[in-house]
Amino acid sequence: MGYLLCFLIFTAACYSVKAHTEALCAAAVTGCGESALKLVITLAGSMAVWGGILNLLEKSGAAKKLTKTMKPLICKIFKGIKKDGEAAEAISLNITANLLGLGNAATPLGLDAMKKIEAEERPGVRTSANLTLLAVINACSLQLIPTTVSAIRSALGSENPMEILPCVIIVSAISVTVAVLTAKALTHGR
Amino acid sequence: MDVSSVILLGVTVFAFAYAAYKRVDIVSAFCEGARENLKVAIDLLPTLCLLMLAVSMLRASGVLDWLTGILTPLAVKLGFPAECLPLAILRPISGSGAIALLEDALRQCGPDSFPGRVASTLCASSETTFYTVAVYFAAVKSKKPKAALISALAGDLAAFIFSAVTVRIMLG
C-alpha cells in the first residue's frame, strides 16, 4: 500500500509539471486535509445517529430475534454443521451483525466463528469448504442500509441520499449469490 | 411514495418502539451506540487524509481525467460509466481509498447523476475483499485462502457489472 501511494503521488506530481497543472496540484496538497476533515465530520454525524439506532435494536433483543430466524438458513448453507452447536450460533451472530452494518462487532464475531468451525471438525464434514464460505460471505457486503455511502451522498448535496437503497440490496444479493456459488463449486469434494 | 424513505423510517420507528416495549433505557443505549460509531469515524481521519492527498493530487494534475479518457471505450462496451472505473478497481483493495474516490466521483459528476448513483451503489454493495479474506484466514490453522479469494472476487465482478445494470433499470 505504501509503495502504491508513493507511486501515485510521484505520477501525479510529474504529470502536473508536464501538463502545466502544477499550481492546481500544489493547491490539492494544501487543501486535501480540509476536505478529509469535512468528510469525516459529515460521516461522523450520520454514523453516530445510526450507531444509536442500531444499539437500540441490539439492546432490545431485536437483533437476537433476527439471529434466531437466520439459523435454519445457515445450517442449510454450511453443510454438516451441528444444528445447535457453537459454530452455528457464532455464524448467525456474525451474519446478523453484518446485515445490521455493525462492522466493528461483525469482525470479532466472524473470527470467533472461523475458530469454532475448525474446532467442530469431525470426519465426513467439509471444514475447509465451510471456512471458505464464511470468509467469502464476509468479503461481500451484506449491510442492509448503506449508511456510510448515503452520508457521503448527503454531504455532497444529493436530493435523496437513500434512493440507492433498493439497488444496493439487489446488487448485494446478486454478488453474494455469485460468490457463494463460486465457492461451492471450487470447494466441491473438499 | 418513496420506498427507500419508507424502509428507513420503518427501521427507525421500529427500533425506538421495540426498545420502549422492552423497557430499554433508550437515551443511554442510543448514546452508547452513537459514541462508539463516532470513535470509528474519527479514527478514519488519518488514513483518509493520506488517501485524499493521493486522490486530490491525481485529480488536480489531470491524471484521473487522462485515465478516464483511456478507459472510456472499454467502459462504453460494458455499459459502465468510465468515471467509476478507478473506484471499481480500488474497491476490493482499500476501504478508505474507496471512500476517497467515491467522494471525488460524486463531486465531479454530482451524487444524483447516473455515474454518481452507480459509484454509490457499487461502493455500498461490495467490501474490502483482500483485507477481509486475509484477516479471516489469519484466524485459523487452515491457510487455504485461494478458493475464498477467487470466489469473493467473482462476487465483486458481479457487483461491478450489475450496479450499472440495476441503476439503469431502477433509477432510469
Image (cartoon, rainbow, N blue to C red):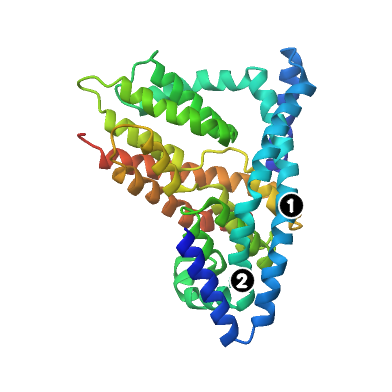
Q: Nearer the viewer, mark 1 or mark 2?
A: 2
Question: Is B88 displayed left or right of B109 in the figure?
Answer: left
Q: Residues within 10 Å of mark 1 (few under 14, many from 20)?
A: some
Nearest the viewer among B115 and B148 is B148
Please name the residue that numbered disc 2 is placed on.
Answer: B57
Hey, what amino acid is under mark 2? Met
Q: Chain of mark 1?
A: A
- Side (left or right) of A14 relative to A91: right
Q: Secondary structure at mark 2?
A: helix
User: x%, y% of residue A185?
Assistant: 27, 41
Q: Closest to the observer: B78 or B72?
A: B72
Q: Position of residue B101 (x, y in %)?
A: 59, 61
Q: Position of residue A59 (x, y in %)?
A: 66, 19
Q: Residue at x 50, y 47 (%)?
A: B127
Residues under labels 1 and 2: Cα distance? 24 Å
Task: State which quadrant residue A145 falls in.
Answer: top right
Q: Up-down: is A161 above or below A69?
A: below
Q: Crowding at label 2, few (<14), some or many (≥20) Cα neighbours within 10 Å?
A: many
Give the residue at x 42% y 49%: B130
Quick one: SS at disc 1?
helix
Q: Identify the image quadrant of residue B40.
A: top right
Whether callout 1 and callout 2 share a subunit is answered no
- The residue lying at 72 percent from left, 19 percent from top is B19
| Of residues B79 and B59, the one drawn nearer to the viewer in this rendering | B59
Q: Which residue is mark 1?
A: A154
In the rendered image, the residue lying farthest to the right is B27
